[in-house]
Amino acid sequence: MKLINKQIKKISVVTGLAVFTAMSSLAVQPGQAAEWLSQTNFTTTELPVPEESLAQEQAAVALKDNFGVRETVIKIPVSIISSASGYKTIDVGPGVANLDYAKVIQWQKNVDAGRERWRLDPLQVARMEGRNYGFTDKDTFKIVKRLDRSEIARHGEIHVKVTHNNKDYTMILVKPFGGGDAIWTTYKVYGYQQPAPPSQTTGKTLFSTGKYDGWKWQKNSYPRDMAFAAIVDYAAQLKQDPRIPQSVLKKVQDVDYNNKVVLFAYLGTAPTGGYGIGIEKITMQANKMTVTVHTKSPEANSMVTMAATRPADYIALDRAIFDIWGGVDISFVDQTGRVLSKNKVTISHR
């Protein structure tokens, strides 16, 4: 799909009208299409216009049903591109719902100019754009489904299976435009659980460590007695909360709770050695705190002690951090972004 610079003068419906669709409350609006075209020059091509096509050309806006979706179709004249087999038109629609067309149009222009050619390869697109969902170069990517046309995108849809931390996800890629050099981009990502959130950090980082980066969780589930706690009063909470064994909580009994709050992560009873849990990051935005824990389990046939273990970790933060009107909402999540527990800490001034 090559966009050629010059200015449009005249073109018939028979020789080609690009169709840019504004789906009801979705996709591209007519103003966006007009703005894009106003910034893009096309080659001048003068061709005879048959009389029967003039009436069609005058009907510039029409309604139609496309896979059951009510659409407003804006017909915009575009230039003709010559090829060995004759003439063909540039097809830029109908639009794919929920795509940011300001971005995809610029990406297509970059490809047409010889840059970012990886956007033409679905697997490369999955690898590059998959980084926004926490996927890495160590993960496996495999195309498992191809559609030349679908309800989502009439120019093509591809499903890519991504295996990340021993769990499978599916990336849905679509073609926003038609043509041999049209780009691919991500429409949606889903799997057995919610994919990892985008890698960009939001809020303030209160704690971070990289010592658990090599850990991997090899199992399908966590121990049933897994538990998390925000401890503001050791004696009172130990009596009221039986989830975590007293023998495990002993490691935080000497913390100065007049000045500290302890965030405690307990993996639960593991059948053997080789298991672990560590707090690797704590971030805070307004009154929302996220505690990211990293877990590990032993690989098959690895040498481990056969005695049961009870891995746990904790971080003590200044009590003043939690002294916020209305309290602090705390979410414990694992390395894949899965929410494991939610807590709330409210500092009372009585």
Image: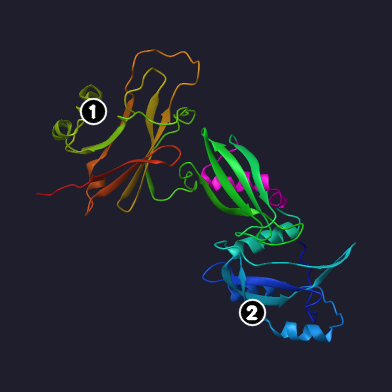
Residue 7 colored in magenta in the image: no
Query: Which residue lies under the disc numbered 1?
Result: 252
Q: Quadrant of residue 2?
A: bottom right
Residue 152 against residue 136 in the figure, above or below: below
Q: Is residue 260 visible?
A: yes
Instruction: Please identify the quadrant where the N terminus is shown.
Output: bottom right
Residue 350 against residue 222 in the figure, above or below: below
Residue 130 colored in magenta in the image: yes
Magenta range:
117-137
- N-terminal of the two: label 1 or label 2? 2
Residue 161 numbered mark, or none: none
- Tell me where residue 5 appears, x and y as whole percent: 78, 70
Outermost residue to the left = 350
- Tell me where residue 81 appears, x and y as whole percent: 83, 68
Which of discs 1 and 2 lies nearer the camera? The answer is: 2
In the image, what residue type sits under mark 1? Answer: Val
Residue at image location 64% in from the left, 42% down from the top: 144
* Figure label count: 2
Q: Is residue 324 left or right of residue 41?
A: left
The front one of 309 and 12 is 12
Colour basis: rainbow
**Cα separation between marks 1 and 2:** 70 Å
Q: Name the secondary structure under disc 2.
A: strand
Query: Which residue lies under the disc numbered 2?
Result: 62
State the predominant SS element of the stretch in magenta: helix
Q: Name the secondary structure under disc 1.
A: helix
Circles 1 and 2 in contact, beta carbons < 8 Å: no
